[in-house]
Image (tube, coloured by chain):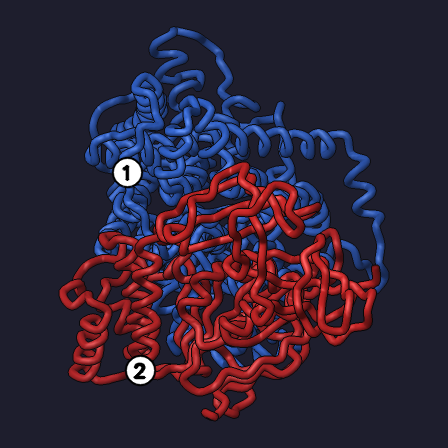
Chain colours: A blue, B red
C-alpha cells in the first residue's frame, strides 16, 4: 500500500502515529471498552435488559429530551454570541484598549469554575436574590429550571465559540469583502454571501463544541436545573453517588452518546466538503474594511458591551459575596473566607496547580500534533484517529469519569488515586479544542507552504517545527489555554478520580455548596479566576512576541492580550 | 548528447472523481530531460501537467511507472530527499519569515554554518536584484519581488533540478515577459535542469529548449518550438501552438492537392482521391489583388492593423482563412471587400498524420 510505504519512509511521522495510537488506545478506547463491558455484559453474557429498563422509565426519557433541548439552545445562542463578539473584535474598528476590555469580560466565564455563574444567578434571582428580592421585592421566586440553566451555560460557554470564530474571521482577507463591496454588493449582502459562508467551518466547529460542552455539563444543571428540569448527566451522577448504582448510571449517561455522535458526524460531513483557502503564500495588502456600516458597528459594539456588562455584574456579585460574612443576611466585610481556603483548602489548591501545570503543555502539544496529522498527513487510519481523539471530548464527563474509575482501579493499571490519571483525563478530554482550532486554521493555510518547506529539504518534523507550528501558534495557545483553564475549573469527570492524596478546588467548591458554605465557595471561585487570568495573560504575551502571522491581527490581541 | 537528468517511465496517476469514478490525471507519460535542459510541459488546464510536475517533486506519488532523477529511482522518495527547487504559482513564501530567512530556509535545514549561509543568501539575492531586501517581510513586497524571492529560495541550496508550476500567472503581462527572461537567463547561467509548467504557449516557446504538449493526461508531442509549430503531429497541437489554418485538401495527382479550387504542388505520398489535412500558418499565405471572380481568389472580410503586422480574415470558398502579413506597407493597400489572389508556399506546408476518407 503506497500510504504505508510513505509513512515508513518518514520515521518522525511513523513514531508520532504509533505513539499517539498507543496513548489513544490506553486512555480512550480501553476505558470506554471497560465501561461498555460493565454496562452490557452480565455474568459473561451480553444483555440489553438494563438499557431497555432505563429507556422505559418516563423520567429518564424526559431527561434525555431536556438534555437535547438544553444543548441545542446553548449551542445556538452561544454560537450567536460568540460570533457577535468575534465579528465585533475583527471588524468593529474598536480601539485596542476597548477591545481588551471586551475580551477580558468575554473570557471571564471561560476561566471560572463551573459553578460561578450558577452561584451568581442564585445570588441574583433566588428567594433572597439581589435582583428578585432586593430590587424588585419579589418573594418566593424560583431561580431553577430551563431558562436559568440555559442562561448560565450560554454565558459560561459562549467564549469557546468566540475563541473558535475569531481567528477564522481574522484570517478572512478583508480584500475579499472589499472586492465584493466594489462589485456593488450591499453591505448586508456581502456579509451574507461572503463573510458568513467563509466562516462556516468556524460556525460548525463552534456549535459542535458548545453542544458537546452543554451535554457534558452537569455542574450547572446540578445547581440550577432543579427537580422540574432533569437532564441526563445529573440523573446519571445522582444514580451513582446517591444510589451507588454504577451500572445504571453508566447506562444512563451512555444514552447521551447518540446525540453527541450525531452532531459530530453532521459537522464532519457538512464542513468537510468545503475548502477555504484564504491564507496563501501570496500576501495581499491588508486594507481597513469599509464593509461595515457605521450604525451596524455601533449596534454590534453596544450588543457586546451589554453582554459584557451582564457578565461583569455576575462576577462583581461573586466577589462581593466572597468578602462579606453572609450574603443577603450579614453584609459586613470580612477576609475570613479567604483565610479558610488558604489553610484548610490549601492541599486542594496545591494539587490543582500541580495537575494543571503538568497537563497544560502536554495537552497543547498533543492537540496541535493530532490536528496537524489529521488535517495534513495522509496515513492509513487517519479518520479513525480523528474520531477516537474526539471521543473523550464528545462523551459527557460523567461517562469518562466512570469509565476511568472502572478501567484504572485494578492492577496492572491501578492508576486511580494518583495525579497521573487526572492529568490524562484532562489532556484527552480537553485537547480536542486545540485539535479543532488547529484543523480549522490549517484549512485556511495553503498547503503549498508545507510543500515548499519539503522541497527545500525539510522532513516532516522539521517542516512542522519551522513552518506549521509558527503558523498555527494561535491554535496551539488556544489549546494550551483551554487545557489549563479546564484543569483549574472542570469537575464532571474528575470528581470520580479525586482521592485522599489528590483533590481539586472544584470538588471543594461543590462540597462547600452542599454544606451551604457559600462564602468559601465564592472565595475559591475568585482565587481560580485570578490564577487562570494571570496564566492566560502570560500566554497572550508570548503570542504577541511570536507575532504568528497566519491569523494576522487575531494573533496580536488573542485571548485579550 | 548531454546525460539524462530526469526520466519518467510510463508514469500514471489516477484520481477518484465523485461523478466519473476513477479517472486518469496522468496516463502513461514517458519523458526524458537532459542535463541543463529546460523542458516545458504545456497544455490547457486539467491536462495533467501540474500533476506530472508534482510527481517529479514528490508531492504526489504515481500509481504506476517510475521516476528517476540523475539515475536514481525516486518514485517513492520523499520530496525533501530529492534535491529539487520548486516554484509555486502563489510563491508560497513563509509569511512569518523575512526575505532573508525565506531564502536561507533550505540552507538552515542543511545545517549550513552562519558565515557561508549569509554569503550564499546575499549572493543569490544580489543575483535576482534584491540585494537590500533581506530584512523585509514578504507582504511588503510587490508580486514581482515576491516572485524573485521565491526564485532565490529555490536555487540557493543548489538543487539538482528546478521545477516551476505556472510561476508567472499571477503577474501582469509586461512583468511576465520580464520575469520569464530573468528566469531563463538565470537557468542558463547556473545550467540547472528545469521543468516548467505553463498553459501559455507564447511563454513556453520563449523560455524552452524543448516543449512537451499534454492533452488529457498524455504527452501528445514532444519537441522544440519549431517542431511543434511547423510539424505538429495532431490537430490539437496545431491548434494549441500558434494560430493555424487547418485545411481539408484532396489529392488530385501524385504531386498536387486541391483546396477549394486552389492547386498546391505537394507530394503527400497519398493515393489520388484521398483527403488530407494541411496545417497552414497565417504567415505562410500570400495575398495579392485579384480580379473579381478570378479562380483561386477570395474576399477580405476583416482586417486588423497591428502595427508590425496586419491580420486578415479571408473567405475562400467554404473556408475562412487567417492570414498575417508583415510586408503590407510595400504592396498596394488591401481592405475589407477586396478580392485577393491566395497563394501558399508549398515548402512550409505540413500535412497531419492520418489520412481521412472523403
Q: Chain of mark 2?
A: B
| Residue at x 22% of width, y 52% of height | B140
Does B19 appear above or below A153? Answer: below
Q: Chain of mark 1?
A: A
Disc 1, SS: loop
Does B165 appear above or below A445? Answer: below
Disc 2 packing (10 Å; few <14; some 14–19; many ≥20)? few
Residue A374: x, y in percent?
54, 61
In the visual, does B36 lie left or right of A58?
A: left
Residue position for label 1: A287
| Residue at x 33% of width, y 36% of height | A90
| Residue at x 66% of width, y 73% of height | B12
Residue A247: x, y in percent?
72, 51
Disc 2, SS: helix
Residue B128: x, y in percent?
24, 69
Mark 1–mark 2 Cα distance, whole angstroms, equals 40 Å
Q: Outermost residue toward the left?
A: B132
Residue B186: x, y in percent?
30, 75
Residue position for label 2: B190
| Residue at x 46% of width, y 74% of height | B195
Say which of B284 and A341 sits in front.
B284
Answer yes or no: is residue A487 visible: no
Disc 1 packing (10 Å; few <14; some 14–19; many ≥20)? few
In the visual, does A289 lie left or right of A436?
A: left
Say which of A57 and B274 sits in front.
B274
Does B349 appear above or below B223? Answer: above
Amino acid at each position: 500500500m503506497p500510504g504505508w510505504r510513505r509513512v515508513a519512509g518518514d520515521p518522525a511521522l511513523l513514531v508520532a502515529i504509533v505513539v499517539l495510537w498507543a496513548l489513544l488506545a490506553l486512555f480512550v478506547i480501553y476505558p470506554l471498552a471497560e465501561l461498555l463491558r460493565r454496562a452490557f455484559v452480565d455474568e459473561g453474557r451480553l444483555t440489553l435488559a438494563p438499557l431497555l429498563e432505563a429507556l422505559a422509565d418516563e423520567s429518564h426519557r424526559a431527561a434525555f429530551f431536556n438534555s437535547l433541548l438544553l444543548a441545542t439552545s446553548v449551542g445556538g445562542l452561544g454560537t450567536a454570541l460568540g460570533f457577535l463578539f468575534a465579528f465585533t473584535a475583527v471588524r468593529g474598528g474598536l480601539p485596542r484598549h476597548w477591545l481588551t476590555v471586551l475580551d477580558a469580560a468575554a473570557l471571564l466565564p471561560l476561566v471560572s469554575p463551573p459553578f460561578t455563574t450558577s452561584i451568581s444567578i442564585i445570588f441574583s434571582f433566588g428567594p433572597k436574590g439581589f435582583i428578585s428580592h432586593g430590587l424588585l421585592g419579589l418573594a418566593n421566586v424560583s431561580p431553577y429550571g430551563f431558562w436559568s440553566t440555559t442562561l448560565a451555560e450560554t454565558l459560561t460557554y459562549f467564549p469557546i465559540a468566540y475563541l473558535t470564530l475569531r481567528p477564522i474571521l481574522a484570517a478572512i482577507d478583508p480584500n475579499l469583502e472589499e472586492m465584493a463591496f466594489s462589485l456593488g454588493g450591499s453591505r448586508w449582502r456581502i456579509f451574507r454571501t461572503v463573510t458568513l459562508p467563509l466562516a462556516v467551518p468556524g460556525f460548525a466547529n463552534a456549535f459542535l463544541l458548545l453542544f458537546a460542552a452543554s451535554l457534558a455539563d452537569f455542574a450547572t444543571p446540578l445547581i440550577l436545573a432543579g427537580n422540574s428540569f432533569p437532564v441526563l448527566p445529573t440523573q446519571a451522577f445522582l444514580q451513582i453517588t446517591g444510589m451507588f448504582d454504577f451500572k445504571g448510571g453508566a447506562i444512563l449517561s451512555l444514552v447521551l452518546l447518540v446525540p453527541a455522535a450525531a452532531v459530530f458526524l453532521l459537522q464532519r460531513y457538512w464542513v468537510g466538503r468545503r475548502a477555504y483557502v484564504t491564507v496563501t503564500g501570496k500576501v495581499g495588502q491588508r486594507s481597513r474594511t469599509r464593509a461595515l456600516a457605521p450604525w451596524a458597528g455601533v449596534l454590534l459594539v453596544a450588543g457586546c458591551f451589554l453582554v459584557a456588562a451582564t457578565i461583569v455584574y455576575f462576577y462583581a456579585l461573586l466577589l462581593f459575596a466572597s468578602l462579606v460574612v453572609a450574603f443577603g443576611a450579614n453584609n459586613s466585610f470580612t477576609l475570613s473566607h479567604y483565610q479558610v481556603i488558604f489553610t484548610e483548602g490549601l492541599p486542594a489548591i496545591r494539587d490543582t496547580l500541580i495537575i494543571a501545570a503538568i497537563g497544560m503543555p502536554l495537552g497543547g502539544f498533543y492537540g496541535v500534533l493530532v490536528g496537524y496529522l489529521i488535517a495534513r498527513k495522509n496515513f492509513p487510519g487517519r479518520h479513525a484517529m480523528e474520531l477516537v481523539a474526539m471521543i473523550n471530548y464528545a462523551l459527557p464527563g460523567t461517562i469518562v469519569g466512570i469509565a476511568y474509575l472502572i478501567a484504572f482501579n485494578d492492577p496492572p493499571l491501578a492508576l486511580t488515586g494518583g495525579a497521573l490519571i487526572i492529568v490524562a483525563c484532562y489532556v484527552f478530554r480537553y485537547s480536542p479544542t486545540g485539535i479543532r482550532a488547529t484543523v480549522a486554521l490549517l484549512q485556511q493555510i495553503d498547503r503549498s507552504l508545507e510543500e515548499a518547506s519539503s522541497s527545500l529539504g525539510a522532513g516532516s518534523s522539521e517542516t512542522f517545527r519551522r513552518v506549521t507550528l509558527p503558523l498555527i501558534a494561535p491554535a496551539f495557545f488556544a489549546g494550551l489555554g483551554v487545557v489549563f483553564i479546564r484543569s483549574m475549573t472542570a469537575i464532571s469527570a474528575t470528581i470520580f478520580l479525586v482521592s485522599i492524596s489528590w483533590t481539586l478546588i472544584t470538588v471543594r467548591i461543590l462540597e462547600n455548596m452542599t454544606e451551604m458554605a457559600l462564602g468559601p465557595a465564592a472565595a475559591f471561585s475568585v482565587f481560580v479566576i485570578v490564577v487562570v487570568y494571570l496564566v492566560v495573560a502570560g500566554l497572550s504575551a508570548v503570542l504577541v512576541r511570536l507575532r504568528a502571522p497566519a491569523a494576522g491581527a487575531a494573533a496580536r490581541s488573542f485571548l485579550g492580550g | 548528447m548531454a546525460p539524462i537528468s530526469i526520466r519518467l517511465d510510463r508514469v500514471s496517476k489516477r484520481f477518484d472523481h465523485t461523478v466519473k469514478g476513477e479517472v486518469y490525471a496522468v496516463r502513461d507519460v514517458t519523458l526524458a530531460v537532459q542535463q541543463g535542459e529546460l523542458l516545458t510541459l504545456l497544455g490547457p488546464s486539467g491536462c495533467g501537467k501540474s500533476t506530472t510536475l508534482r510527481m517529479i517533486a514528490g508531492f504526489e506519488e504515481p500509481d504506476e511507472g517510475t521516476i528517476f532523477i540523475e539515475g536514481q529511482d525516486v518514485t517513492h522518495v520523499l520530496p525533501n530527499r530529492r534535491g529539487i527547487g520548486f516554484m509555486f504559482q502563489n510563491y508560497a513564501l513563509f509569511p512569518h519569515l523575512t526575505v532573508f530567512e525565506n531564502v536561507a530556509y533550505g540552507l538552515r535545514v542543511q545545517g549550513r554554518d552562519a558565515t557561508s549561509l549569509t554569503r550564499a543568501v546575499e549572493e543569490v539575492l544580489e543575483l535576482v536584484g534584491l540585494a537590500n531586501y533581506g530584512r523585509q517581510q514578504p507582504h511588503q513586497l510587490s508580486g514581482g519581488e515576491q516572485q524573485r524571492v521565491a526564485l532565490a529560495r529555490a536555487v540557493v541550496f543548489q538543487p539538482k533540478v528546478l521545477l516551476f508550476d505556472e510561476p508567472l500567472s499571477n503577474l501582469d503581462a509586461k512583468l511576465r515577459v520580464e520575469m520569464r527572461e530573468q528566469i531563463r537567463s538565470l537557468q542558463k547561467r547556473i545550467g540547472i535542469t528545469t521543468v516548467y509548467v505553463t498553459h501559455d504557449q507564447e511563454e513556453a516557446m520563449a523560455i524552452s529548449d524543448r516543449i512537451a504538449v499534454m492533452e488529457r493526461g498524455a504527452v501528445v508531442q514532444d519537441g522544440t518550438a519549431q517542431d511543434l509549430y511547423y510539424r505538429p503531429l495532431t490537430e490539437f497541437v496545431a491548434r494549441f501552438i500558434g494560430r493555424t489554418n487547418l485545411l481539408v485538401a484532396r489529392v488530385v495527382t501524385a504531386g498536387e492537392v486541391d483546396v477549394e479550387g486552389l492547386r498546391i504542388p505537394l507530394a503527400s505520398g497519398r493515393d489520388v482521391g484521398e483527403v488530407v489535412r494541411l496545417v497552414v500558418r497565417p504567415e505562410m499565405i500570400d495575398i495579392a489583388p485579384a480580379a473579381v471572380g478570378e479562380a483561386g481568389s477570395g474576399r477580405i472580410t476583416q482586417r486588423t492593423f497591428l502595427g508590425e503586422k496586419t491580420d486578415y480574415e479571408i473567405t475562400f470558398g467554404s473556408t475562412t482563412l487567417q492570414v498575417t502579413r508583415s510586408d503590407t506597407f510595400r504592396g498596394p493597400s488591401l481592405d475589407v471587400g477586396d478580392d485577393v489572389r491566395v497563394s501558399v508556399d508549398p515548402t512550409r506546408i505540413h500535412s497531419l498524420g492520418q489520412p481521412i476518407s472523403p
